Image: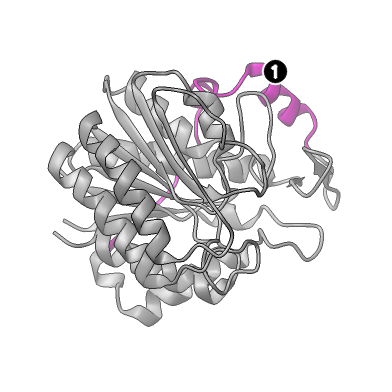
């Protein structure tokens, strides 16, 4: 079965007011590399629906959603959610609903056996968004919305999240911490933005803070020692991935030294967990990755593994 590739043109309408690393060109770069790589025959494209209010409110407070709705900027104007660089324009809320809706659709597809795997090529990203706040370029927590949909709508009991973005998924951790139905495994550069995760104490959170200049050998060692055994013991019914590619050597957003083969290794190990425990059911969701060529190449490496039987 093919891997579903889920996106929507409205994810491009979330546009920054000026030069900004989290730009629509990120999705264009992925599309360009899909064509150049020849992987297209192994993908099945679907357009993302809008996440419903009910689906969003499983994760986010109503007051937060209402504030976003009420504060939608006028055409040609922008606001920021965190007083910094998490921008919000007239089309941003619609794009956020598409991004979250893509993940909900991906969960439905893999759990209803239309496919084993799905990749959501969406923006804005999500893993820094908490229940009542957006930050770090994130408005809604896309992965968490998908997880709660799997638990509440499909009746699952155990969902694992693996987050290999170079930044700690603080919003995801805040949402799922101490929820025994969810195992959250996160590798990230530390100390670094958002400066969280190193001191977490929770039975269902496996954090792997790693120093700057971490390369593939060091990352693989940490994942093999801490993440993979925890995933095996958890016996997930579904695996979700916060797939951030900003740890690439060419990406100046951070200071890891990863290359495409490292993302291929990561994906193969995570995919192996899904194959052994949940019939290969895995939904991957784009998070970071800001050097356009490196992002596109890394996503292709990721998808080539997901399309393997």
The secondary element bearing badge 1 is classed as helix
Above or below for 300 versus 151: below
What's the residue at 56%, 42% (across, down)? Answer: 126
Above or below for 238 versus 241: above
- Residue 72, given in percent of the width and then of the height, sits at 78, 36
Above or below for 258 versus 63: below
Q: Residues within 10 Å of mark 1 (few under 14, many from 20)?
A: few
- Residue 221, given in percent of the width and then of the height, sits at 35, 55
Quadrant for the N terminus, please: bottom left
- Residue 157, given in percent of the width and then of the height, sits at 27, 20
- Residue 283, given in percent of the width and then of the height, sits at 33, 45
Quadrant for the C terminus, please: bottom left
Does residue 192 appear in the picture of this structure? Answer: yes
Does residue 46 appear in the picture of this structure? Answer: no
Out of 59 and 74, give the one closest to the viewer: 59
Span colored in magenta: 43-72
What's the residue at 62%, 19% (across, down)? Answer: 61
Instruction: Locate residue 263 relative to residue 212 in the image: left or right.
Output: left
Is 49 contained in the magenta span? yes
Out of 36 and 269, give the one closest to the viewer: 269
Instruction: Locate residue 295 relative to residue 70 in the image: left or right.
Output: left
What's the residue at 57%, 31% (across, down)? Answer: 199
- Residue identified by numbered label 1: 63
What's the residue at 32%, 37% (across, down)? Answer: 107
Above or below for 44 versus 110: below
């Amino acid at each position: 079965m093919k891997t579903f590739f889920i996106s929507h043109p409205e994810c491009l309408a979330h546009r920054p007011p000026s030069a900004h690393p989290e730009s629509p060109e990120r999705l264009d770069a992925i599309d360009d590399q899909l064509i150049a790589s020849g992987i297209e025959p192994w993908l099945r494209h679907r357009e993302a629906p809008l996440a419903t209010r009910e689906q969003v409110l499983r994760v986010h407070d109503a007051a937060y959603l209402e504030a976003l709705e009420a504060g939608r900027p006028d055409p040609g104007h922008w606001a920021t959610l965190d007083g910094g660089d998490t921008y919000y324009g007239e089309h941003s809320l619609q794009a956020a609903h598409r991004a979250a809706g893509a993940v909900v659709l991906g969960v439905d597809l893999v759990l209803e056996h239309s496919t084993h795997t799905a990749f959501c090529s969406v923006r804005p990203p999500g893993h820094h968004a908490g229940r009542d706040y957006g930050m770090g370029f994130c408005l809604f927590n896309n992965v968490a919305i998908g997880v709660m949909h799997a638990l509440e709508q499909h009746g699952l009991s155990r969902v694992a999240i693996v987050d290999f973005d170079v930044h700690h998924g603080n919003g995801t951790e805040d949402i799922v911490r101490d929820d025994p139905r969810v195992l959250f495994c996160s590798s990230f550069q530390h100390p670094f933005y958002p400066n969280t995760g190193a001191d977490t104490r929770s039975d269902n959170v496996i954090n792997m803070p790693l120093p700057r200049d971490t390369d593939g050998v060091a990352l693989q060692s940490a994942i093999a020692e801490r993440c993979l055994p925890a995933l095996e013991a958890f016996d997930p019914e579904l695996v979700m991935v916060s797939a951030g590619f900003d740890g690439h050597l060419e990406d100046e957003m951070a200071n890891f030294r990863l290359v495409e083969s490292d993302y291929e290794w990561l994906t193969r190990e995570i995919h192996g967990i899904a194959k052994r425990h949940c019939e290969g059911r895995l939904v991957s969701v784009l998070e970071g990755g800001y050097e356009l060529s490196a992002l596109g190449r890394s996503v292709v490496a990721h998808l080539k593994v997901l399309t393997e039987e």
